[in-house]
Amino acid sequence: MSTKPKKVMLIDDNEVDLKINSKIITLSNLFEDIIICHSGEEGLLYLKNHVDQQELLPDFILLDIQMPEMDGFEFLEFYKRLSNDITDKCLVAILSSTLDFGDIQRAEANPQVIRLLKKPLMPAELKEILDKYI
């Protein structure tokens, strides 16, 4: 794998947050491509549909917690059951504005999650994670 991860997946139901974080990621030049998903279901569907196309899978997933229908924790429950071809390639970080201490504890305790990041996304913090894990 090259030193620069190729793809990041943003999963968030908030259109404004998606636009802001996409712009921050683009300007940071840390990824070559951004996959935008407006729900946990959309993110899971993308991953399942591309399991046999490793080059289309994200290297990194930034996941919001508070979303309607399927929240970030429900996404993680389904995610951990996906093929190892996906879960071994895709690192997951929570990107949330939650102040709920229970959510924060759950995110930090989840073995699927490498880090909990606060919105808005900070490029230096993202780079630090990528340097450490990729």
Image: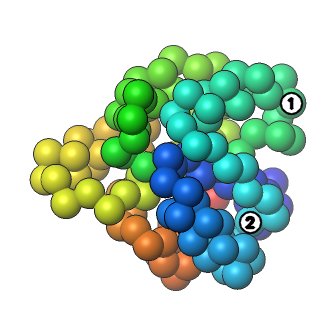
Answer above or below: position of 116 versus 55. below
Residue at image point 58% right, 20% down: 82
Give the image location of residue 104, x and y in percent.
22, 52
Left or right of 50 on screen, residue 83: left
User: In the picture, which quadrant includes the N terminus?
Assistant: bottom right
Q: Which residue is mark 2?
A: 31
Total labels: the figure holds 2
Left or right of 50 on screen, residue 30: left
Question: Disc 2 residue type?
Answer: Phe
Label 1's element? loop
Q: Gap between marks 2 and 1, in whole Å?
A: 18 Å
Give the image location of residue 12, x and y in percent.
51, 49
Locate residue 115: give its quadrant: bottom left
Which of disc 1 and disc 2 is earlier in sequence?
Answer: 2
Question: Disc 1 residue type?
Answer: Gln
Answer above or below: position of 86 versus 33. above
Q: Which mark is residue 53?
A: 1
